[in-house]
Image (cartoon, helix red, strand yellow):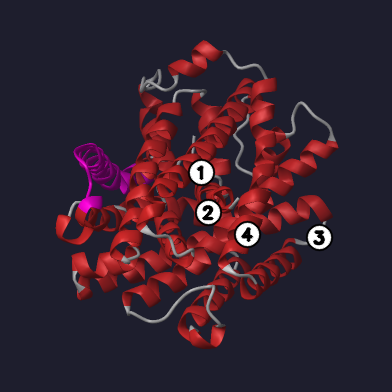
Amino acid sequence: MKKLLGITLGIMTALGGFVDFGQIVFTMQAGALFRYRLLWAIALGTVAIIVYMEMCGRVAVVAKEPVFAVIRDRLGRRFGLVVLIASNLLNLLTLAAELGGIAIAVRLLTGWPEKIGLLAATVLLAAIVAVSRFQWIERLFGLSGLLMIVFAVTAVLLRPDWNDFASGFLPQGTPGSSQQLLYFYFAVGIFSAMLMEYEVHFYSSGALEEDWKPEDLTENFAVASFGSVLGAVLTCALLVVGALVFLPRSIYPNLLSSAAIAGAFPFSTRALLLAVGGIIACLGGAAVETALSGGYNICQFFNLPWGKNLPMAKVKTFTQTWFAMFGLGLLLVISGLHPLQLVNVSVIFGMVLMPLTYYPILRTAMDKNIMGKHVNNWVDTVLGVAILVLILIAACAAIPLMIATDAGTP
């Protein structure tokens, strides 16, 4: 039972990372524009996050070093501090987007004004984090996020052309040169959204919160793989729903409400409640991950005590930081910034910053002096280097593509 419940760390990390506000709307937009032609980006992102999530967990368990301790040691304290500031700014933008998305979903369920829903959601999430141990946080948001399975059921019931679907896992571009840049923008965006840095920050910290030992490394691979594959299946389902509900009707879904309605398309009102509930759970999980990651990052970089399983009085900086993250995220949304604007910025900013997170992880996992017999094998290293090269290419292309396509405007 302990091993089974441990998988909820992977589920929460994957659903909070893959199926967050940006991915829900972004992936449906990709389906509405390009049908199944971007499924390969989901598959590529899934392989990449499994490889690096497993490495992060292994480094954390063997070297007792979570991600930001690794970044500090590999990049140096001065440059590492720049990465720390940028990473926590990215976490803050992402957190604000998730809170804004929850407010929209709460309005769909209750009819409350978005600002009331925003305030209520922020207070409730902060309270849950304050009173819960780490294991209960991951179980609550990991298991409740499984309500998103309604989107997978919807995708199957809409009867996609499975041959056409399968062909989408091979890169094939798109007809018409006028849409090529838009196609590549969405490819980079989907790839980036599946590898957002806070996923590995949270995952490696969670491995230490749960006190994993080297003998748990098999579980580490299982957790990383199962959670990531589940997140990928749901992301594929979102793209299929976008392709079958919106593309034939020439609708460009730029609202979270459109995504929720599409998720319950073949069903009744009860399915819509499940879809909205799943969205709230996933967005809530992403908000909690980013808030806690802010605290983890600062404390790990400066060697301060941290952990959700320790009394707040013993981890004051950690507690104050994640509380502040919630407060600042709330203020950003109240100030009038639209969640979708925040999503576009965070996804592209995350892609640019990504090499500075994943390179130190790869270097440490390859270091036999640190990792001993748990050092990367040749398959891990080849995959890690190949993925890092793709990350560097996507990072260089991200901002030019955003400018050229006006942030993905069709």
Q: Nearer the viewer, residue 280 or 68?
A: 68
Q: Which residues are magenta?
A: 373-402
Residue 399: where, in percent of width, then height?
33, 49
Circles 1 and 2, Cβ within 8 Å, touching? The answer is yes
Task: Find residue 212 and report its horizontal and vertical position in percent.
Answer: 43, 60
Q: Secondary structure at mark 3?
A: loop
Displayed quadrant of residue 301 = bottom left
Q: CA distance from mark 4 to mark 1?
A: 25 Å
How many residues crowd around disc 3 within 10 Å: few (fewer than 14), some, or many (20 or more)?
some
Q: Are marks 3 and 4 in contact (CB under 8 Å)?
A: no
The numbered mark, 2 or 4, whose residue comes first in the sequence reads: 2
Q: CA distance from mark 3 to mark 1?
A: 33 Å
- Circle 1 sits on which residue? 227
Q: Nearer the viewer, mark 3 or mark 1?
A: 1
Q: Which mark is residue 100?
A: 4
Amino acid at circle 3: Trp
Up the image or down, 109 lies above or below 304; here it is above
Nearer-N-terminus badge (1/2) = 2
SS class of the residue under badge 4? helix
Q: Does 379 lie within the magenta span?
A: yes
